[in-house]
Image (tube, grey):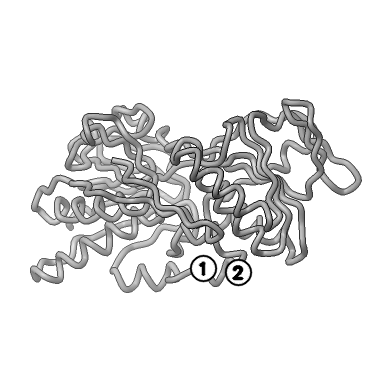
Amino acid sequence: MTVPIVIIGSGLAAWSTVRELRKLEALSSMALQPIILVCADNGDFYAKPTLSNALAQRRTPAQLITTPAAKIAETQNVTLIANTCVHKIDAQARVVHTDKGNFNYDRLVMALGASPIRVPVAGDAAQEVLSVNSLTDFAVFHAKLDGTPKHVAIMGAGLIGCEFANDLALGGHTVSVIDPAPRALAALIDEDTSLALQSKLAPLGVTWHFGTAVEAAQKHENRIRLTLANGEMLKADLILSAVGLRPNVQLAKDAGLTTDRGVVVDEFLQTSDSAIFALGDCAQYGFVSGKIQVLPYVMPVMHASRALASTLAGKPTPVRFPAMPVRVKTPAHPITVASPV
């Protein structure tokens, strides 16, 4: 019996790799390689970028699903092991240990994604701070908004923070954005563009609080009272943290793989173990422009998945990243940022 390819994850990186491999197999009349896909959620396929522009479009969490898990697994001839926690990877024995059994692999693909960075906040409402990094997260956030106007405080004026600010404002909510930086998207765009974005969002109900951060969140009269580092006080109904993502590397690290900010891979997306590959938000591309980079964007995932599929199909193919501009989904003032590589 052929030992399968095992993929851990169910996001764009995981399902795109499956789809690209199946395309190559069909074009070359190859026999289908068995694939087991193990994921912590139910495996439904959706476009993650839609999470930060769904509110203005009045789209529910269910409406963001483009292909249900059962359908994509059947179509792509994949054994889906959903709602499953991976406890350990035994790289020497080539076994993935999960709470639903152990799975041998011929090759392993780590599409582990990244998790929201949580900054410390004092106070009895600290646990009320939300993050939206998955469809499940969005469903929780959507339910708390409850279709009624709210005042939402957003921690972070980066790409995701600004996208949510625009989307919430268009959805009828009032927004306060708090960031230690001096302006919006400070790490990505120039000052004039930042000021233009801020001026376009302000009339929609977005206020900006720069050069400070949330120190404490206290429950107060069915709302949340925020104390900022500069002494300012704000009241909000919800707090959304959008301060960035941290690649999920613990599984790889525990398996003895080389990790840094992410799981370090070469141009073939191969880790320090020849049978294990990584791509997407968890991967760290040490060969890009002579710099070590994590590329948490859609286009790098698409290019990486095509190259990896070719390698898995028996034709080792290095990934080559072309110019890949990043579009900031702020319809009040659309912005395209230069390629991250």
What element does badge 1 sit on? Answer: helix
Label 2's element? loop
Place of residue 286 in the rendered image (x, y in percent of width and height, measured from the top left): 25, 32
Residue that badge 2 annotates: 60
Looking at the rendered image, the quarter that the N terminus falls into is: bottom left
Q: Residue furthest front?
A: 192
Q: Are marks 2 and 1 in contact (CB under 8 Å)?
A: yes
State the residue in front, 143 or 80: 143
Kind of residue sitting beneath label 1: Leu
Q: Position of residue 303 (x, y in %)?
A: 24, 53
Residue shown at 14% from the left, 50% from the top: 311
Residue 154 appears in which quarter of the rendering? top right
According to the picture, the residue beneath numbered tag 1 turns out to be: 64
- Horizontal side of 317 relative to 188 (left or right) equals left
Residue 223 appears at what percent x and percent y? Answer: 84, 47
Q: Judge left or right: residue 165 versus residue 340.
A: right
Q: Residue at x 58, y 32 (%)?
A: 182
